[in-house]
Image (tube, rainbow, N blue to C red):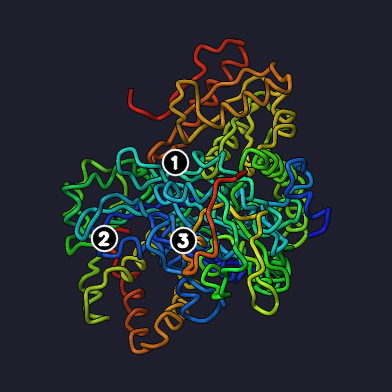
């Protein structure tokens, strides 16, 4: 999304610039809305315990499980992770800790 | 402003008074007139008295209210005469046209002292003779054209032949009967 | 050459829709507009239109289907009356704020009070703030012509708003009258294709429609929507001028009848304006200087033009076929008087009549009462009653 496009959804856009009827004419921009600061609990990935079973990936409601091109989990996207803890709960190998934010 | 002819129809729900008023509007339209044809909708059901209206004019019509002082009244069912005030507002220099086997003299006493022209037409007999069934619309149409003179008779008859041919394209055998019904009603209407 | 025809107001609207040949029509039957989708569905069955006809289970669904179809990139139309329009209420606002130029045939009928199927303007007047353009029609010809112009107005890039074309239920919707139709090819050329900038079925550029729109943005969208309504006035005049070239029938924001040297004026919508013209002709023949203004465009409200036109009269009667139940006049009256006040036009005496509710027949004699009162006010300068009811049994 270009800077100009970004402007149309910003909080400074004027009525002359905003899109008609509030349509979003630019696809694939949900990542621009950062939800990481909603988090009070935080998942911690323990790489040495992880067996790469990837059970965490499909349960994450926010696609915050980072997976590389080889299909291996590489960590957690804290820009968007809301700290729901589902990944920690589902992990059969206790490879994800779930702790208070800031600790 | 040219003369506007105003006609009020009285019938019973299901008898086709509305259709007859629309047929008259059509016939007048086909001769180049400006027309209005509209029913007065109420809670009517089959058999209940209904009212329909026509305005026919050489100039564009703008008025959009019901007709209270008609030039002509057409009564499609003579049993309405005792239950509906059919001559209400009817102009004395106009006429009332009633579908009945009675003569104008026999009917007049029931018309609350109406002094204008009273015409009668036995639409049932004409319809049964020419069409084999009771469809009062066509004979009533012929009678109202004859009495009102609102459309030139020859133009009207020629036009209706074409109109029937078009309307009954799939039943050409009824065209002749309908034309006959028109001709007979125009000849047989009494009280002119 | 125009086609000389005779048909009812409902059939005229349906024929206009046939000639427009929209992508989608979704409607639910309600008296007195039922015939519009009824006629149209026969056109669909006969294959004379390409339209997808969506038979829905309510008016709420009818307009929702239109919203979906129009957002997808199609041209959608519907028809309704009274309680049907009321059931569409929520979606009326969604169509307008989503800037979807749907066209609706609104056959005016009283909005229940108690059950009544006949004409007044309480349905469309209630929807006056929903963001729809509203065009009013005196007779079947105007209903047909307004339908033909509606798409062009609503779909203009400076507008992008839904359009409601109103005519009087039964009085014109069910009355057979003369009218002139345009040839199909001329309508097709005039109406043209609908080519929205953005639409849901455009796979090259996917979009989202109807998003959550909170404190940070909703006001900007409303302001933009308001601008579209302001822009509509110019577009309506442009489209009407083009239509006049095609047909010889001229339409403005309102029609002035015998107003040039008139002392007094009646302002009245739809079919009653026709009856009022008949009365004006009679008064003129008797040397009385009476005139008539018939608003065609109620939304957008032509503040500048209407107040300028009204400024020259000594006395004005604004006729409302709907009560606002605000204890202070009907909707047309309050809009006109507040517009006049805002523009500093305060010389004319203005009175209000609420008339014809629930289909009460409006006779020429009723309108004579109004003109007589106006002439009296013009000569005495005195108004004894501002808010009045006409034709009700006292």
Q: Nearer the viewer, mark 3 or mark 1?
A: 3
Give me the chain letter of mark 2. B
Residue B113: percent from left, percent from top: 23, 41
Marks 3 and 1, how far apart in space? 64 Å
Extreme-right residue of the structure: A3
Q: Which residue is mark 3?
A: A89
Q: Residues within 10 Å of mark 3 (few under 14, many from 20)?
A: few
* SS category of the residue bearing label 3: helix
Q: Nearer the viewer, mark 3 or mark 2?
A: 3
Label ID, residue C120 = 1
Report if residue C137 is visible in the image.
Answer: yes
**Contact, CB < 8 Å: mark 3 with mark 2?**
no
Q: Residues within 10 Å of mark 1 (few under 14, many from 20)?
A: many
Q: Which of C263/A70 is in front?
A: A70
Q: From the image, which quarter does the N terminus of chain B lie in?
A: top right
* SS category of the residue bearing label 2: loop
Q: Which of A95/A84 is in front?
A: A95
Q: Residues within 10 Å of mark 2 (few under 14, many from 20)?
A: many
**Contact, CB < 8 Å: mark 3 with mark 1?**
no
Residue C20: percent from left, percent from top: 62, 68
Q: Which residue is mark 2?
A: B76
């Amino acid at each position: 999304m270009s800077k100009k496009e970004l402007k149309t959804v910003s909080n400074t856009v004027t009525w002359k610039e905003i899109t008609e009827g509030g349509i979003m004419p630019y696809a694939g921009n949900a990542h621009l809305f950062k939800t990481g600061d909603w988090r009070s609990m935080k998942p911690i990935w323990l790489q040495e315990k992880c067996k790469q079973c990837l059970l965490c990936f499909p349960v994450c409601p926010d696609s915050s499980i980072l997976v590389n091109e080889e299909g291996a989990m590489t960590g957690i996207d804290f820009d968007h992770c809301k700290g729901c803890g589902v990944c920690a709960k589902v992990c059969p190998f206790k490879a994800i800790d779930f702790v208070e934010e800031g600790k | 402003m040219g003369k506007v002819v105003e006609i009020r129809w009285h019938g019973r729900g299901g008898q086709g008074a509305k259709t007859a008023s629309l047929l008259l509007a059509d016939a007048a339209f086909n001769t180049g007139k400006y027309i209005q044809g509209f029913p007065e909708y109420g809670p009517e059901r089959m058999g209940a008295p209904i009212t329909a209206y026509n305005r026919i004019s050489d100039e564009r019509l703008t008025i959009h209210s019901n007709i209270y002082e008609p030039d002509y009244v057409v009564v499609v069912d003579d049993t309405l005469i005792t239950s509906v005030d059919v001559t209400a507002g009817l102009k004395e220099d106009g006429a009332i046209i009633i579908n009945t086997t009675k003569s104008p003299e026999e009917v007049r006493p029931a018309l609350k002292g109406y002094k204008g022209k009273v015409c009668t037409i036995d639409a049932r007999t004409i319809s049964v003779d020419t069409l084999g069934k009771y469809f009062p619309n066509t004979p009533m149409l012929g009678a109202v054209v004859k009495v009102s003179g609102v459309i030139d008779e020859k133009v009207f008859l020629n036009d209706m032949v074409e109109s029937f041919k078009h309307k009954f394209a799939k039943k050409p055998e009824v065209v002749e009967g309908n034309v006959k019904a028109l001709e007979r009603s125009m000849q047989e209407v009494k009280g002119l | 050459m125009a086609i000389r025809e005779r048909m009812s107001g409902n059939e005229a609207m349906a024929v206009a829709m046939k000639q427009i040949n929209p992508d989608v029509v979704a409607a639910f039957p309600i008296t007195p507009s039922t015939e519009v989708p009824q006629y149209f569905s026969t056109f669909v069955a006969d294959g004379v239109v390409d339209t997808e006809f969506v038979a829905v289970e309510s008016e709420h669904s009818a307009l929702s289907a239109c919203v979906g179809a129009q957002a997808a990139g199609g041209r959608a139309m519907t028809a309704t009356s009274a309680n049907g329009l009321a059931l569409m209420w929520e979606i009326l606002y969604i169509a307008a704020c989503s800037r979807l130029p749907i066209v609706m045939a609104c056959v005016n009928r009283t909005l229940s009070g108690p059950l009544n199927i006949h004409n007044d303007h309480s349905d469309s007047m209630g929807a006056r703030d929903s963001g729809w353009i509203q065009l009013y029609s005196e007779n079947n010809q105007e209903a047909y012509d307004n339908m033909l112009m509606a798409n062009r107005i609503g779909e203009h890039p400076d507008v992008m708003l839904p359009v409601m074309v109103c005519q009087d239920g039964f009085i014109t919707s069910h009355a057979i009258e003369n009218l002139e139709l345009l040839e199909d090819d001329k309508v097709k050329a005039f109406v043209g294709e609908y080519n929205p900038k953005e639409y849901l079925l455009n796979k090259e550029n996917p979009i989202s429609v109807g998003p959550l729109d909170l404190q940070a943005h909703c006001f900007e969208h409303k302001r933009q929507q308001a601008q579209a309504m302001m822009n509509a006035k110019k577009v309506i005049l442009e489209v009407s001028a083009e239509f006049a070239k095609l047909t010889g029938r001229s339409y403005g924001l309102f029609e002035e009848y015998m107003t040039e040297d008139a002392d007094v004026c009646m302002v009245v919508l739809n079919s009653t304006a026709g009856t009022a013209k008949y009365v004006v002709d009679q008064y003129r023949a008797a040397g009385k200087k009476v005139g008539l203004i018939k608003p065609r465009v109620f939304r957008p409200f032509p503040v500048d033009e209407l107040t300028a036109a009204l400024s020259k009269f000594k006395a004005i009667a604004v006729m409302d076929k709907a009560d606002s139940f605000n204890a202070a006049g009907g909707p047309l009256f309050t809009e006109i008087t507040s517009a006049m006040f805002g523009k500093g036009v305060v010389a004319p005496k203005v009175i209000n009549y609420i008339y014809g509710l629930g289909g009460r027949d409006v006779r020429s004699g009723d309108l004579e009462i109004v003109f007589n009162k106006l002439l009296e006010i013009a000569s005495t300068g005195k108004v004894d009653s501002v808010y009045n009811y006409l034709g009700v049994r006292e």
